[in-house]
Image (cartoon, grey):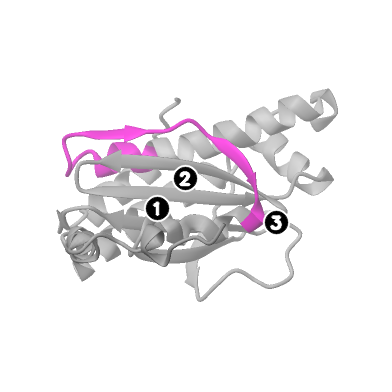
Amino acid sequence: MATSRAAFAPRRGAGTAAATAVLAGTLSEQAKTSFETIATVALARGLAPEGESAQVVPIDDLPRRMKEKKAVVLSIASDRFRLVVALLCRLDADGKAHFARLNRIDPAEWSDQDFEDAVNECGNIIVGSINRDVGRYFPSVGMSTPNVLDREALAYLEALGPGHRRVFQVTGLSLDFYAVLFVSPTGAVDFRAEVEALEDAVDSGELEMF
């Protein structure tokens, strides 16, 4: 049976309404920088074992060839934006050794499930730190639980709508890490993160467990 094209056509005015809803969300350049700063501090804080120091730098995009096949993905939502962080991880012997050192444990004592749980908890700590610091500027924010996804699933971040995407590389540790930050505004977002206060939190070794 032939299907009428009209069945798939948007109602008159529906496209305009949708476009207006998307345009209602705005993210200032200051806000973009602030989200990046908060994420940078959280990554440096959450991935470095005791006595080690991580450097976090923005890069243009993820490398085409990567050993990291999985990503721990968490989100933060408020009435003005949705933020997603994806931490790409190597679930191999080198990755296991790093996360064991981060948790001060012998990797030989870990099962595969223990290892995956530790990776999830690391993502939890990093995004929990972002959630706390963002919460200084936005009164109502909520955080998801971690999900381990295939790296290819990150392509679907764009489905959240127009937003700001930044890729980070974390160096200075036994192995490099990569992370993706995506912020999609649903309202007007403009704030300035107090960098000195965030750096003080790193220096004091503050960690929040979730």
Image point (47%, 35%), residue name = 125
Q: Is residue 178 left or right of residue 21?
A: right
Mark 3 vs mark 2, CA separation in Å: 15 Å
Residue 205 can be seen in this image: no
In-front residue for pair 38/174: 38
> Height in image: 114 above or below 44?
above
Vertical placement of 142 versus 13: above or below? above
Give the extent of the magenta segment: 129-152
Q: Residue 124 placed where, x, y %?
A: 49, 34
Taking depth in this image into account, of 99 and 146 the one nearest to the observer is: 146
Element at label 3: loop
N-terminal of the two: label 3 or label 2? 2
Residue lying at 26% horizontally and 44% vertically, measured from the top left = 134
Give the quadrant of the N terminus.
bottom right
* In the image, residue 146 above or below residue 152: above
List the residue tagged with mark 2.
Answer: 45
Direction from residue 97 to residue 159 in the image, left or right: left
**Residues packed near mark 2 inside 10 Å, few (<14), some (14 to 19) or many (20 plus):** many
Marks 3 & 1, CB-CB < 8 Å contact:
no
Q: Amino acid at mark 2?
A: Arg
Is residue 137 found inside the magenta-colored segment of the image?
yes
> CA gap, disc 3 to disc 1?
19 Å
Q: Which residue is mark 3?
A: 175
Amino acid under disc 1 = Ala
Q: Amino acid at mark 3?
A: Leu
Task: Indicate left or right for 147 with 112 as reference.
Answer: left
Q: Which residue is mark 1?
A: 39
